[in-house]
């Protein structure tokens, strides 16, 4: 905002895209939906569109927690591993006890694991990349030890609840997981944009030193972000069981990178302080729209990865451009 | 600034929602090309493999593509990102059903994880066939085309036993992944062929090598560190056998240890010829793919879903045939193996 006040501002599209990180991704999403609807005759159907949303739920929820952490200029490589451990605990406990205890214990476990990362980052001032890389290894191995090479099918009603389908207006397929997912994004959006805590998170990501000087309790805010992210991963574990009622220690090995992909495509800056959760929602949808659409256009799967990778680079390039302009 | 940014985002989100909504509406109005709905084009067949990096699955995919083309059908090949990627396989199944395939051929990573998606596919009139790996329960699919892995393990065991020529067996077991169905079947089959029970004292040591050459080499090195007094090695697959061979040759043990294997990759034909391991049991992924594709095409024509378990067979490959055991040499093996011989 270095422009001289009063100077007539030209409405420049590229300027808009750069200033509002979620705008570009949203346009890309609309474009992708339109293109796939035109080139395939199976993409554009209510069933398929709700399927696309369903397919983006687990990674989308992981990406929601990831967004909070990336906004503080951190990163979480352990999120999917934490979630998988959560699903295993839930599934094993539900086998011997009631579903509610299992669910809460799973979410609690994820919250604890998230706060361990947060505690190491804030109190020892270790780089988040290294802390969560270590956590990834430890948690993934712990899951395997805990599971002892088994996977655990889940038949508990509460744990599988989010996968239950019902039909709006008798046509539109909706799962409870979708509603919960959308609610979580809206709550996070509200918390980040309408509360003091949210402003502290952005301030911290922009410049921790300046944030400290303005009286923000930096380490407490930072810790809270990792804790909340942990709780979100716990809910992601619930989502995962709703989608696939089977807790498997080998599942979601690329979930951490997939969530970072969604965050970055959604326009949140890896350097912190810029972006938001609505962009991430769009980012997660773009990834599954691409997967679904390219599959239905009959394009080989590896090219789908190529497309996703190129989008990541494009998104980061746009972010860099925006940063340079804002200086 | 903050407020207007939020506003713009809301507008953007609204636009997306509107786009999705109108998209949905227009589909409804035109009646949509519903799943598996009145397609007049060629029969569409989906193939979902565990990964698309393993040469075994590449062979399966290429053979299925060729078979589909021959029969005027269209094959769409998808895969998980890694072994155990249930979410990836489920999404692939859903997307294939959406696309209106007549049948789905799948090598399940973990059948527990994908059972729901398979059921849903079946309920939409799609025939589902397991290739290479059985689902648990087998009723999750209409039919299965696979190697009888217990039988293949038994062939390896019987050969190793015969090659020991009466010597008391002292065996190392190089298994795959704990809990894997194929891994357990081959393991038990081998012991059956050897005439040993699980946990018998003749089993000197065992390790999980995950079907990976490096892991197998390390595991064998560690086991040999404990005792070199062995005369036979069971290996889950050929990369495992290559790893075991490297460890054995470092200790100078290759001449008195009999290594058997399973799979029938082309690279193995050279290994067997060179005597790195004396025998391997070949399986036939091309046959699985061809017969699976044919079954779907038949289903599209006749409306009758395939059923049951179809053993695609296995063949003992060795340059040192032993009396009483059917086998073929590596020249025959090279004609029938899968993957490429390079490397």
Image (cartoon, helix red, strand yellow):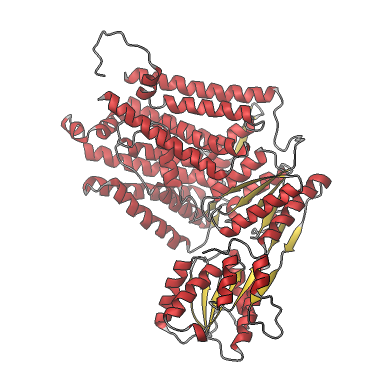
- The residue lying toward the viewer, choosing from A204 and B51, is B51
Q: In this view, does B32 lie above or below B222?
A: above
Identity of the residue furthest to the left in this view: A213
Question: In the rendered view, does B327 fall on the left or right side of B229?
Answer: right
Q: In which quarter of the image is residue B25?
A: top right
Please tell me how many numbered marks the rendered image carries.
Answer: 0
Percent position of residue A129, x then y: 31, 47
As rendered, which of B12 and A316 lies closer to the eye? Answer: A316
Q: Where is residue A6 in the image (x, y as percent from the top left)?
A: 26, 8
Q: In this view, does A182 lie to the left or right of B192?
A: left
A129 on left or right of B196: left
Q: Indicate the quadrant where residue A211 lies.
A: top left
Q: Can residue A158 be seen in this view?
A: no
Q: Is residue A252 above or below residue A30?
A: below
* Residue B57 vs residue B106, the one in the foreground: B57
Residue ranking furthest to the right: B302
Looking at the picture, how far across and down is residue A84, in whole percent?
A: 45, 51
Question: Is A209 positioned to the left or the right of A150 in the image?
Answer: left
Residue at image coords 61%, 37%:
A165
Residue at 62% of width from left, 68% of height from top?
A: B264
Q: Can residue B271 be seen in this view?
A: yes
Location of the N terminus of chain B (image quadrant): top left
Q: What percent of the width, then of the height, locates residue A305?
A: 50, 42
In the displayed structure, would residue A123 be above or below residue A289?
Answer: below
Q: Nearer the viewer, residue B258 or B308?
A: B258
């Amino acid at each position: 905002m270095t422009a001289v006040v009063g100077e007539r501002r030209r409405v420049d599209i590229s300027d808009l895209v750069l200033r509002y990180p979620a705008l570009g991704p949203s346009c890309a999403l609309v474009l992708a939906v339109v293109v796939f609807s035109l080139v395939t005759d199976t993409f554009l159907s209510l069933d398929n569109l709700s399927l696309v949303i369903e397919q983006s739920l687990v990674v989308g929820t992981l990406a929601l927690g990831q967004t909070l952490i990336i906004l503080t200029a951190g990163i979480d490589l352990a999120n999917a591993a934490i979630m998988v451990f959560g699903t295993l605990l839930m599934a094993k406990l539900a086998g011997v006890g009631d579903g509610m205890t299992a669910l809460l214990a799973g979410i609690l476990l994820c919250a604890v694991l998230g706060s361990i990362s947060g505690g190491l980052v804030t109190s020892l001032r270790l780089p988040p990349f290294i802390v969560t890389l270590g956590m990834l290894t430890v948690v993934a191995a712990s899951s395997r030890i805990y599971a002892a090479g088994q996977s655990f099918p889940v038949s508990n009603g509460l744990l599988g609840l989010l996968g239950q389908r019902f039909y709006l207006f008798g046509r539109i397929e909706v799962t409870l997981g979708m509603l919960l997912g959308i609610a979580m994004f809206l709550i996070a959006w509200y918390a980040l944009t309408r509360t003091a805590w949210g402003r502290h998170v952005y301030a911290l990501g922009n410049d921790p030193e300046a944030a400290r000087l303005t009286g923000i309790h930096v380490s407490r805010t930072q810790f809270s972000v990792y804790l909340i992210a942990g709780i979100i991963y716990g809910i992601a574990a619930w989502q995962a069981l709703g989608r696939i009622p089977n807790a498997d220690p080998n599942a979601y090995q690329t979930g951490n990178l997939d969530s970072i992909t969604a965050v970055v495509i959604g326009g949140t800056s890896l350097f912190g302080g810029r972006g938001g959760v609505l962009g991430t929602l769009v980012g997660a949808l773009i990834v599954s729209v691409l997967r679904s659409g390219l599959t239905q256009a009959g394009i080989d799967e590896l090219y789908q990865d190529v497309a996703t990778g190129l989008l990541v680079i494009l998104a980061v390039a746009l972010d860099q451009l925006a940063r340079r302009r804002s200086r | 600034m903050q407020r207007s940014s939020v506003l713009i985002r809301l507008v953007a989100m609204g636009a997306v929602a509107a786009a999705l909504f109108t998209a949905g509406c227009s589909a409804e109005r035109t009646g949509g090309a519903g799943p598996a709905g009145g397609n007049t084009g060629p029969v569409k067949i989906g193939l979902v493999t565990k990964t698309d990096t393993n040469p075994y699955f590449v062979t399966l995919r290429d053979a299925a593509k060729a078979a589909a083309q021959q029969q005027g059908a269209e094959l769409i090949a998808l895969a998980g990102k890694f072994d155990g990627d249930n979410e990836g396989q489920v999404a692939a199944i859903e997307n294939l059903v959406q696309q209106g395939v007549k049948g789905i051929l799948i090598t399940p990573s973990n059948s527990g994880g994908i059972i729901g998606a398979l059921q849903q596919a079946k309920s939409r009139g799609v025939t589902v066939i397991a290739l290479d790996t059985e689902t648990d329960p087998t009723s999750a699919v209409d039919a299965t085309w696979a190697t009888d892995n217990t039988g293949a393990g038994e062939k390896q065991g019987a050969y190793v036993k015969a090659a020991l020529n009466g010597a008391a067996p002292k065996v190392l077991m190089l298994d795959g992944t704990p809990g894997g169905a194929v891994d357990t079947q081959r393991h038990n089959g081998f012991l059956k062929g050897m005439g040993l029970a699980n946990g018998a004292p003749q089993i000197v040591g065992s390790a999980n090598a995950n079907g990976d050459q490096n892991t197998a080499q390390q595991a064998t090195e560690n086991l040999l560190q404990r005792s070199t007094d062995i005369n036979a090695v069971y290996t889950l697959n050929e990369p495992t056998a290559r790893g075991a061979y490297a460890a054995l040759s470092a200790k100078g043990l290759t001449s008195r240890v009999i290594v058997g294997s399973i799979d029938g990759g082309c690279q193995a034909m050279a290994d067997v010829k060179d005597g790195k391991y004396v025998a391997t049991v070949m399986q036939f992924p091309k046959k699985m793919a061809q017969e699976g594709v044919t079954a779907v095409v038949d289903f599209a024509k006749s409306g009758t879903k395939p059923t049951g378990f179809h053993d695609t067979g296995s063949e003992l490959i060795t340059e040192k045939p032993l009396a009483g055991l059917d086998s073929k040499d590596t020249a025959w093996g090279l004609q029938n193996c899968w993957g490429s011989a390079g490397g």
